[in-house]
Image (cartoon, rainbow, N blue to C red):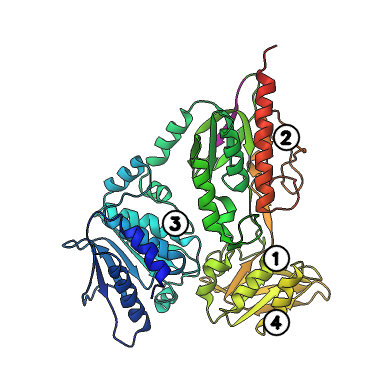
Amino acid sequence: MLDERLKAQLKEHLGLLRKPIELVATLGDDSDRVSQQTRELLADIASVSDKVTVVERDLDDVRRPSFLITNPGVDTGVRFAGVPLGHEFTSLVLALLHVGGHPPKEEAELLEQVKALPGPLHFETYFSLTCQNCPDVVQALNIMSALNPNVTHTAIEGGAFADEVKAREILSVPTVYLNGELFAQGRMGLADIVAKLDSGAEERQAQEMSGRETYDVLVVGGGPAGATAAIYAARKGIRTGLVAERLGGQVLDTAGIENYPTVLHTEGVQYGAALERHVREYEVDVIDRQKAVKLVAPVEEGEPLVVEFENGAQLRARTIVLATGARWRNLGVPGEQEYRNKGVTYCPHCDGPLFKGKPVAVVGGGNSGVEAAIDLAGITSRVTLLEFLGELRADEVLQRKLRSLPNVTVVLEAQTTEVIGDGRRVTGLRYRDRTSGEEHVLDVAGVFVQIGLVPNTDWLADTIELTDRGEVVVDAAGRTNVPGVFAAGDCTTVPYKQIVTAAGEGAKAALSAFDHLIRTTAPV
């Protein structure tokens, strides 16, 4: 199951085990291909560490095939149903380490919160092997079940349990159930999950945040622009903070990155993790999972700038770098929000496998839309790509690939007017031919929206000058119209929304902030 390279890496990781591990497998009969793959995977794991043993038990109350990662003599732990390869192989390795006594790399206070949670809490997470958002959720819940006997977690590979996915009408991953009821969908970290379970956590965190000292530079946003700005500011030896909704930003939703100098190929999740590691190498006060809601400019000279957050906290700074990035643009048509995660989706890599063998539509003819159609053509029965304009806007190399696919249809001059459903899931999409005015209905099970980005700047409208598209207006040095406030990346008027561009603009904004600090504090 595992090649020699992976076995060698796994052997090195499992050298960190402090306690013996028992892998308890409950499998189907010999004709079940997934059960055979599970048996081979577990044998490979046991072959590289003398602390790991495998046993098979015929249990009636668990999924087949599945396996429990536990300690000898213990009947709780981390359970995987299906074969956790692809993006989830890291989740498997971390689960082995955590059950084996290697401590999770999370804040001690957060881990104590996990240990104190009352139960029983029975979690089930449905994931796909191509989902980039799923590992965060799976790993967080695995940590909880490894630390707290009141918590159990089963990570379920949707492809191996397609009938179950269909019965529960799951059309987006990750999808998490708690004690049989829908708990959450989408990317979440350990702190997010604990906050949903511990109602007092948010108030305690808000009080702690508000008590922090004034920063010299506060960066709002954790993508390439924000991370680079924080690194450049910290290297100047000044008090630097970085606060973000999610570290890594929108780059975490990117599948492949092949145009960043010196990096021939990487994936968004890996690049985002590398950004975070780099930031944490410096003395940067990092605060994640916090959404900014208001920027308050000082009334009198010498007073700090203030950023207010959704949880009620306030942070103060002498200068601020805004690097809040952008989010996927919505269609804004009837049915879109009603059927979000019920057939309307924005991530073909995450949710594409859930539409295997079904017809789908992709809205958008730029690079992201054409790439989505190409990916989905290998999974679904038919892909219809709708483009509002009279021609596709994607790179020619992508268009050539698209035209070579027999199960893809391109419709130009198409204005999407409605997402149609039966109350539970998407059943179709209505569009108007902009040339003839004629209305058409596509029978599709999924609608993948790929129509560009909207800057995350709604909260700045009363303070900072924005364009009619919501972009922060900046000059060549990254300065905004408010003294001491700078901006960088996809939220600004700088053209060419690329990772390398954002990183460069982040460095520029941080250096401009440092220059501002020098000039405003120089002796008279």
Which circle's residue, 4 or 2, is located before the other in the chain? 4
Residue extending farthest left: 73
Q: Residue flagged by tag 4: what amino acid is it? A: Ser
Which residues are the magenta region?
Answer: 303-309
Q: Residue flagged by tag 3: what amino acid is it? A: Asp
- The circle drawn on residue 79 is none
Residue 405: tell me if it is visible. yes
Residue 274 higher or lower than 206, as above or below: below
Locate residue 435, reporting x and y percent: 83, 74
Residue sitting at 51 percent across and 62 percent down?
Answer: 132
> Whole-Å distance between the Cαs marked 2 and 1?
31 Å
Which circle's residue, 2 or 3, is located before the other in the chain? 3
* Residue 464 location, quadrant: top right
Pointer 1: what residue?
367
Which circle's residue, 2 or 1, is located before the other in the chain? 1
Q: Principal SS element in the magenta part?
A: strand
- The circle drawn on residue 479 is 2
Locate residue 115, reporting x and y percent: 28, 47
- The circle drawn on residue 404 is 4
